[in-house]
Amino acid sequence: MLKKSALALAVLTLAAGTQAAELSAGKDTQFELNVEVGAYHLSKKDAAGVAQKEFMGKGLNQVEIKATHQLGDGWTAFGEIEVDYDPIVDNNGVQTDDVRLGFAHKDFGRFSVGQFDSYFEDNVIEVLGVGHGDAGFVTEPSSSNDGRHLQYTHKLGDLTVAADYTFSNSAAKDDPNNGLALALAYKLGDVTLAMGHSNHAKYKSDTSAVTKVDSVTGLPGFFHKNFT
């Protein structure tokens, strides 16, 4: 059995790419389809120090479908679903990642409900742009409560404010609880300054297991669009 802490000696992406398409179902309705396909070769040592080589696609492949519909008076309805799959493993099951429904208005902001990462996690914690995600090698703090999720974001010029609320409960103890994440991002040309804080719900939303991380704070930092 391979150790969980086994060192990855070499990770080589053999084929990776993103294909995108936009479809129209009338002047007020738009669909967007994005498909990511790739695989990589991994060599790591087991408990006996023997190199074990694997050809993998886990955590790299995804199908994303988005839709928007203009409702009038500045309001837009939108939805999206992301499905993760592994093309290397035969008959491997697919899993939903982000699932989101909501409404947006240019003057009042954007309201979302569903299963997705918080704005704080996507825009502060993950700014490195590499090694994060379901099979990432850079550990990212998360609430483990992507579901039962409400989000509000609003852009005021170059400033974006965001609030994320997550709800979870323990099936065994019938103990409801919630999590809250707040974030700010300010764009200065090609550079964005971002910071935030997240208090996590006590229990994971899908398993009712206790969440190990209580809170995470991202101090003021910056990232450049050409380096992320």
Image (spheres, helix red, strand yellow):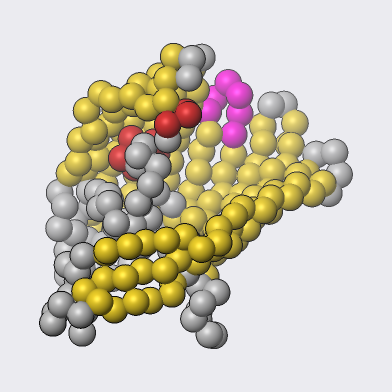
Front-most of residues 142 and 85: 85
Q: Position of residue 115 (x, y in %)?
A: 45, 56
- Numbered range of the magenta stretch: 104-109
Q: Is residue 172 visible?
A: no
Q: Is residue 96 left or right of residue 35?
A: left
Looking at the image, is 21 positioned above or below residue 185?
Answer: below
Looking at the image, is 148 positioned above or below residue 47?
Answer: above
Answer with the quarter of the image where residue 47 lies. bottom left
Q: Position of residue 205 (x, y in %)?
A: 31, 62
Answer with the quarter of the image where residue 220 lies. top left
Q: Residue at x 33, y 24 (%)?
A: 222
Front-most of residues 72 and 116: 116
Q: Residue at x 51, y 38 (%)?
A: 111
| 215 magenta-colored | no
Looking at the image, is 45 positioned above or below residue 157?
Answer: below
Looking at the image, is 174 positioned above or below residue 139?
Answer: below
Q: Residue at x 37, y 61 (%)?
A: 11
Q: Residue at x 26, y 71 (%)?
A: 44
Q: Position of residue 116 (x, y in %)?
A: 44, 52
Q: Is residue 111 visible?
A: yes
Task: Specify the farthest residue to the right.
Answer: 26
